[in-house]
Amino acid sequence: MSHVHGIEDRFAKIVKYLADFKRHGHLVEFWDELTPEQQVYLLDSLEGLDCASLDAAFLRAMATATSTKEDLNDLLKPLARERYLSVAEATESELEDLRQAGLEEIRQGRVGVILLAGGQGTRLGSTAPKGTYDVKLPSGKSLFQLQAERIRKLQQLAGGDARINWYIMTSDHTHTETLAFFEEHHYFGLPADQIRLFRQRSVPCVDFEGRILLDEKWKMATAPDGNGGIFRALKYEGLLSQMERAGVKYLHVHSVDNILIKVADPVFIGYCVRKNADCGVKVIEKVQPDEAVGVVCEVNGEYQVVEYSELSSETANRRNPTDGKLTFNAGNICNHFFTTDFLCRMADTTMPLHVAKKKIPYVDTTTGDRVKPTTPNGIKMEKFIFDAIPRAEQFVALEGRREEEFSALKNADTVGIDCPSSVRGDLYRLHRKWLIEAGATAVLDAADASFDCEISPLLSYAGEGLEIAASGQSFRCPVHLTDADEREPH
């Protein structure tokens, strides 16, 4: 009986709480129809609900969405040269100097990595976490495994007691599967206590009046709060204080879907630390005016990412008279550097909210039927990580080479770009180039014109150390080079 009374008491408190927020009273409309388990689930979620904050967020988001967006095009300036370094224009000795500076920070245990891995491979035709996806490399390695092995190799290159703490942001949709995947693969050779998984927050979805939508009679419709939710999530999960205790001062933050990502790139780390930056981005040169990437630029003395949709055709197509490059060409690829101090500051900062109008399935409270709308009926409120940039005290940008740094996995092969076959090809081309630069006389296509060429991250992080394997050698694809102590998958 006490259990029943406990439920009734909790229910009474929720009803009383919702009485102050009339627009959300429908959340308990179907209470009497629910099973005991469903009642507990609904109570658990409603007891964590802050209606006042949600209503304030809705008003703030709608005010932003409905206000006339300031036309930034006349205000934009490209990044100032003193805040910007292009890898292609730097000398080899400059880059080596930065690389050694970054490796020293890694050696001292001051560098961590935050991986944004909350997404599923929905557009790839998969509901699994995107990091588990097998793009059909010769090795069969997933994105998670490639990134874990780059961390292992980098620790080895740094030497000493180098330890790169790895913080992986999951979502409600991906957390359990991601954890199971890492356990099943023995954390890809890293100590389990070096990896911390933490969940991105979810926020209720609301209709255009700000009423929370029910996904089922016992469950609110929710959506992840965007990659800008990272700052609060790190604080709530106690990871900011863990970083401080562990002596982690610098974080490399990136998304999971870039197969070429240089995890904790020592050149990027070294550059940001040398510049005393609290916030940095790695960009790639945007060469096509209509490429759908935002650009990093200056607006009214502040640095920010201006989304592709906000650029006028004239601005997007503007070119420098000196070199013919696009004037606004610092393409944003979700590749960030933050100091731990900056993360702590951002955790207490109210981030702007971006509104996405969506078709959100919901329970019609008059009929009790679940409806799948054919037109947008509600909004998801998201925060974007790049909105942290204007809050930096010392901001810098490093421009990497696209062919060495960026190839995103977003779509199924039928789309033809940013898909498994395109990212495989980009990795093969890069690894082929590494062999030639290490002294190989040739890397020839296979008889069927395929050019599968994969080098394990455990053998080389970024093309270094391949001279013994490559010098004076001629290769014919398929080529698959592994580290001496690496076992082939059975």
Image: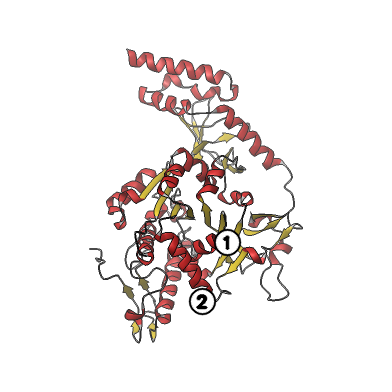
- In the image as oriented, which residue stretches furthest toward the left? 490
- Tell me the residue that label 2 is attached to: 92
- Tell me the residue that label 1 is attached to: 275
Front residue of 287/455: it is: 455
> Looking at the rendering, in which quadrant would you find the C terminus?
bottom left
Write the residue at 47% across / 26% down.
46
Task: Residue 190: give x, y in percent of width and height.
Answer: 31, 55
Examine the image and state in which quarter residue 159 appears: bottom left
Q: In the displayed structure, does residue 400 sit left or right of residue 309?
A: left
Examine the image and state in which quarter residue 20 appears: top right
Q: Earlier in the sequence, mark 1 or mark 2?
A: 2
Q: Amino acid at mark 1?
A: Lys
In the rendered image of this protein, does residue 150 appear above or below residue 454? above
Task: Residue 342: give x, y in percent of width and height.
Answer: 55, 48
Task: Report helix, strand or loop for mark 1.
Answer: loop
- In the image as oriented, which residue stretches furthest toward the right? 74
Q: Is residue 56 visible?
A: yes
Task: Residue 133: give x, y in percent of width and height.
Answer: 38, 56
Write the residue at 47% across / 38% down.
236
> Looking at the rendering, in which quadrant would you find the N terminus?
top left
3D distance between C-alphas at marks 1 and 2: 19 Å
In the rendered image of this protein, does residue 237 appear above or below residue 45? below
